[in-house]
Amino acid sequence: MAPEIGVGMIGYAFMGKAHSNALRTLPYMVYPPPAVARLAAIAGRTESAVREAADRYGYARAYTDWRDLVADPSVQLVDNGGPNDVHAAVCVAAAEAGKHVLCEKPLGRTAEEAKAMLAAVTRAGVVHMVGFNYRFVPALRYAYELLRRGELGTIYHFRARYLQDWLSDPQARFTWRLASESAGSGALGDLGSHIVDLARFLIGEPTSVAATLSTFTRERPGGRVTVDDTFAAAVEFASGASGTLEASRVATGNKNGLHLEVNGSHGSLRFNLERLNELEVCTGSQGFTTLLMTDPAKHPFMRYWWPNGHIIGWEHTFVHEFAHLFEAVAGGGSVAPYGATFEDGYRAAVVCDAITRSARERRSVSIEY
Amino acid sequence: MAPEIGVGMIGYAFMGKAHSNALRTLPYMVYPPPAVARLAAIAGRTESAVREAADRYGYARAYTDWRDLVADPSVQLVDNGGPNDVHAAVCVAAAEAGKHVLCEKPLGRTAEEAKAMLAAVTRAGVVHMVGFNYRFVPALRYAYELLRRGELGTIYHFRARYLQDWLSDPQARFTWRLASESAGSGALGDLGSHIVDLARFLIGEPTSVAATLSTFTRERPGGRVTVDDTFAAAVEFASGASGTLEASRVATGNKNGLHLEVNGSHGSLRFNLERLNELEVCTGSQGFTTLLMTDPAKHPFMRYWWPNGHIIGWEHTFVHEFAHLFEAVAGGGSVAPYGATFEDGYRAAVVCDAITRSARERRSVSIEY
Amino acid sequence: MAPEIGVGMIGYAFMGKAHSNALRTLPYMVYPPPAVARLAAIAGRTESAVREAADRYGYARAYTDWRDLVADPSVQLVDNGGPNDVHAAVCVAAAEAGKHVLCEKPLGRTAEEAKAMLAAVTRAGVVHMVGFNYRFVPALRYAYELLRRGELGTIYHFRARYLQDWLSDPQARFTWRLASESAGSGALGDLGSHIVDLARFLIGEPTSVAATLSTFTRERPGGRVTVDDTFAAAVEFASGASGTLEASRVATGNKNGLHLEVNGSHGSLRFNLERLNELEVCTGSQGFTTLLMTDPAKHPFMRYWWPNGHIIGWEHTFVHEFAHLFEAVAGGGSVAPYGATFEDGYRAAVVCDAITRSARERRSVSIEY
Amino acid sequence: MAPEIGVGMIGYAFMGKAHSNALRTLPYMVYPPPAVARLAAIAGRTESAVREAADRYGYARAYTDWRDLVADPSVQLVDNGGPNDVHAAVCVAAAEAGKHVLCEKPLGRTAEEAKAMLAAVTRAGVVHMVGFNYRFVPALRYAYELLRRGELGTIYHFRARYLQDWLSDPQARFTWRLASESAGSGALGDLGSHIVDLARFLIGEPTSVAATLSTFTRERPGGRVTVDDTFAAAVEFASGASGTLEASRVATGNKNGLHLEVNGSHGSLRFNLERLNELEVCTGSQGFTTLLMTDPAKHPFMRYWWPNGHIIGWEHTFVHEFAHLFEAVAGGGSVAPYGATFEDGYRAAVVCDAITRSARERRSVSIEY
């Protein structure tokens, strides 16, 4: 019999919905499951909305104050899917209450905030994970394995750009994601943190960044924008590799285009999140092979799903992520190296802060953790 | 409060898993749901397996004889996901017991069998649907709407090929899908029925076929193959359009490549099931635009899912299909025109039979329902 | 020193321009050249136009009657790029005058006409070639070599569709290509003959066709259309392979989309003429690799051109074709098997005629040469 | 009658071949031609090779000392396709001798060298052009026109990476391109100068760069590498746009992958040199349309070539470039704004030097001309 883990969910919007779906799907798709979620409680600011979410997804209790959720003894794991400005307070309180913690990315609004969060979970000895869910895309786990086995040879380049376009229109409305107070940063923390994490996961530690940050539209209906629309950085890695990191919310025509390319002496790979069931692999130098990552016998995570050829959706990265987290919780271990720990979340924040500093001070900045 | 529908599932393999997942996902993703499934019972031949499936997916009862499931008063809807040779008996019995029926494709092994099934559901006055789930791919519903609004002008061509490769290796093992007794036909009924249905859904009735059928490997480990590996047909439509239909299980390198192209006087569209979140649309004659079909505000079904740019998987076609079926069951109506009725299933079988006859008799065969 | 061949060109429009360009480019790009063209004469109906063409391309003489060109003793090779209805008369006269002959495709308007042309060149013992220039696309020669070496295993399928759209608009004007008297047939002879030839070149002889032919617009500004807009055929090959052949001039959004796919037990390949510098190859069953066919050390014909990565244009198929023809003329041999002989041209015409008969008689037609 | 221009070609290798082909093709493809090249002379170091090149391409004279070519009174235009370290001396001498000058890119090895070359042609009042031939790719001229008409709105991003892989193998041999003495720089000057020029052509002046440079393999068979293998730069533009510039010779699997993306408030475009006949255009935010750039009635330069759908090769960029240059020479004007002047060549060199300085000094460097 699979152990049960009482989950307390913070937030009922995008991430609340995506996580709830994964928690409900896990026990019959990842079968037998390493553990099963008991949906203990959900918290959010608006009472009617949080109550509806509890009904909809099947949470036993609904709270309007996250402190009540953290204090609830039926909660063993706090899943923090709220806005960035509640990440730190909730995670620290949860750790201090002895709860395991999953925090959505970015971990903190700044590296300093992330460092305090890391200290809290370390002190408490709880299991901790950051929701860098793209580590759990089958194609990217497969890429990780190719790279770890050295199949691409010496790595020369890592190149990533995460392109969206929901702010291309200067009349697009202001949201909490556009205020530095609530979001920390803009495209940098929201999108950039994902590719910084993938760079570290796939290639290793970056050692320097030389970057620019821009905000194209300062005044939007509903508020003043105090975060970046885009950043770009030339980056160097400890291994000697070099490359670029970019993210934008004004890259018109791109909806969720997280594009990666890795080049090594013996091969290369390319990935695009809008076609996340595919990985393009070049071995030798003979051109890229488009692999459909759906073979249950060969491709990571696909044994949970369908016969070869049937693609899965973005949302199932969370099923894989929770399955991995639940193994760690059930086994009392760490989510490393496949999952992102708070240490990884902190390091991503250090790199993001270095990008900001590089852009402001107009100089190359070394990464130091 | 959404009404509850007691569902009895026949089969626990591929389709049983896919349907169960959809039934469990529907109530919180299609929200508020038109109706909610109560997982009343599941039936299958092997007791231990059916019992495990009941536990895994949450069905209240497990039967090894489908007759018991049909007779179970807690079942209002029989979902027939068993092998093709039990489609007819189960569906007829279910209809006679006054149950609504969803039957996986192809409806019968032959048009004659399908006709009897259609007669049974008509007589019983129950709601009936065939599992042509690709009608519920967002891109294909969108294509249907474009075509119905006449945006492509006069339609000249419909071109479809459904390509898989799991039989490319002559040593691939025999299964029930390779025996005419259990499967009816091979690539024709399994893959061809899907594209025949899509042709009828999108373009209208075909009037003639001129076809070939081939079996490349007759003896396989485990048994003698008595169905086709592939078919190809030149086809004419009542509207004057012409085109081709093809399917193959030996099209090496294609995993689930259902490729469609429609050409009209004012535009064209292209679709590939391996990239089911995309539709290529040409308006005017200026080249094809790759549309990502993920905008909740614009694209069919996507309001159920995620912010724009986050792709969904093949499995969610069943969520959309059940939502549509449940509306019909709750409202007492038909699934037409968006869903495939048993009339549609029968007509697809007539076309498939005409293809077989054309290949055997080496002549063009007219379609008559 | 390369021998000189006096070339007499019939026609100064599309093919006249393309061939003249190739003749002028050959001697310094295919270096050292097997022979060099002396541009002896050009013939066409309109005196001012033919004289301008002679000046422009550098032909020594201009004729308004092709008989004078055929009779010109400085002409050793007649290059027949005129409309289809002058193919037979010119080629027969040229052969009878002892001239080598290159004839644009289709060889004749019918198989009967082609047969007479084949008889004439055979009787005369001259070198003969049909302008099936796509045999000289690097990717397709490479495909030929892969197939001849058996690298794709047993061939199951050959699938070709040649899609254009210049007649999608019902108001597109009438031309000689739309009258059966001058053109023989429509999409069938013009586009279909190319893919029939490629099927024979790559896979071998077809043995039967089951086909449809359609004309969507009968009356156009400038004349009444008496040829087909499109055809589609299910086809069987002597080797046991099966597939489809299609061509259309109303496939909106496709400009020159000659798409091929070959599937074998050990691999597959795909090609699209609009990206003629690429070949998609699948070996094993692991997905298609996009090969850029530009490596001088590996890819056919590319030693004539540029360093790897620099693509060539459609027009250079003619440079390769002439280089091959000139070797045959200089060496006194045949253009087989890489080039298409009049025997190949005749056989393509037999297949095209069988497609027409199959469509008219609504039955499968066997191919007999 | 078209005027004749006596052309003296420096170099007979890659560029010598490509330019000679263009000069010979121009008079009948660009018809009527603005001027016609008389192939007056060719110069190169190795006597036998330069003599063979003269024979092969039809140059009247062959010189082993470029000074003789510059002094030859039959030469009106010096076409400098030699290695980078002879660019300056030849161009300055040619200008001083009153010859018009076309110089291959990069103009000089450094901005300082380029500045002297610019001064020389300005003083002499001769027509001058730098061989940034990608301005003459139909898709990129079309992009220029779209941008100039403002069809993409406010430009937010310019993103370019020029990826090759001929140095991925650490055992690839040393050439003059790998020594700073002869080449100036590596990927930066060779590939980077192209994308710097395109950035300026399409978007306008860059104002700052923050960059890295790397050399992965220092010792190669045949010599010690003293130039970069790769660079990456975050870049800001005077218009407020931001983006990245990258080039690499070790991007395994990429042969000549010059990838551009421009994002504006109303649309975007994408381009890849390996598919140079295509341009992907997004207007509105609805996804990218793949345009085949082959319509004689719509697309730049295509009136010279073939009916729609027939793609051209990389080499024809030089035909377009010479046609433009010859108009300037015949008319006594400048090649601006469509062609790159020595001023443009100098500015590209300033940006490249700034990238080098930024990488060395580990700081953002402002561009000042």
Image: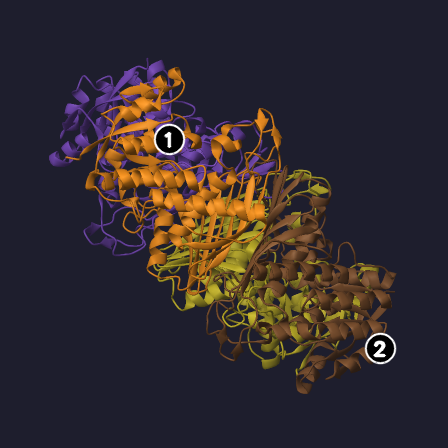
Chain colours: A yellow, B brown, C orange, D purple
Chain letter, disc 2 residue: B
Which mark is nearer the camera, 2 or 1? 1
* Foreground of the two, D155 or D296: D296
Relative to C4, say whether D161 is above or below: below
> Measured along the vertical axis of the image, is residue D317 above or below residue C262?
above
Q: Which mark is residue C198?
A: none
User: Looking at the picture, does residue B276 appear above or below residue C322?
Assistant: below
Secondary structure of the residue carrying tag 1 is helix
Marks 2 and 1, how far apart in space? Answer: 82 Å
Dot 2 and dot 1 residues touching (CB under 8 Å): no
Residue drawn 21% across the image and 37% down it = C33
SS at mark 2 in the image: loop
Residue C101 lies left or right of residue B242; in this view the side is left
Which quarter of the figure has residue A268? bottom left
Place of residue D68 in the rendered image (x, y in percent of width and height, measured from the top left): 14, 24
Labels 2 and 1 in the same subunit? no
User: On the image, which quarter does residue B334 sit in?
Assistant: bottom right
The quadrant the N terminus of chain C occupies is: top left
Say what amino acid the circle numbered 1 marks: Ala
Percent position (x, y) of residue A343?
Answer: 53, 66
The residue sitting at the left extreme is D47
Q: Residue at x 20, y 26 (%)?
A: D59
Q: Indicate the position of residue C11 as horizontal and vertical percent values.
A: 38, 26
The residue under label 1 is: C89
Identify the residue position indicated by label 2 in the image. Answer: B74
Residue lying farthest top?
D1
In the rendered structure, the residue with mark 1 lies on which chain?
C
Q: Is residue C186 visible?
A: yes
Q: Which of B282/D307 is in front?
A: D307
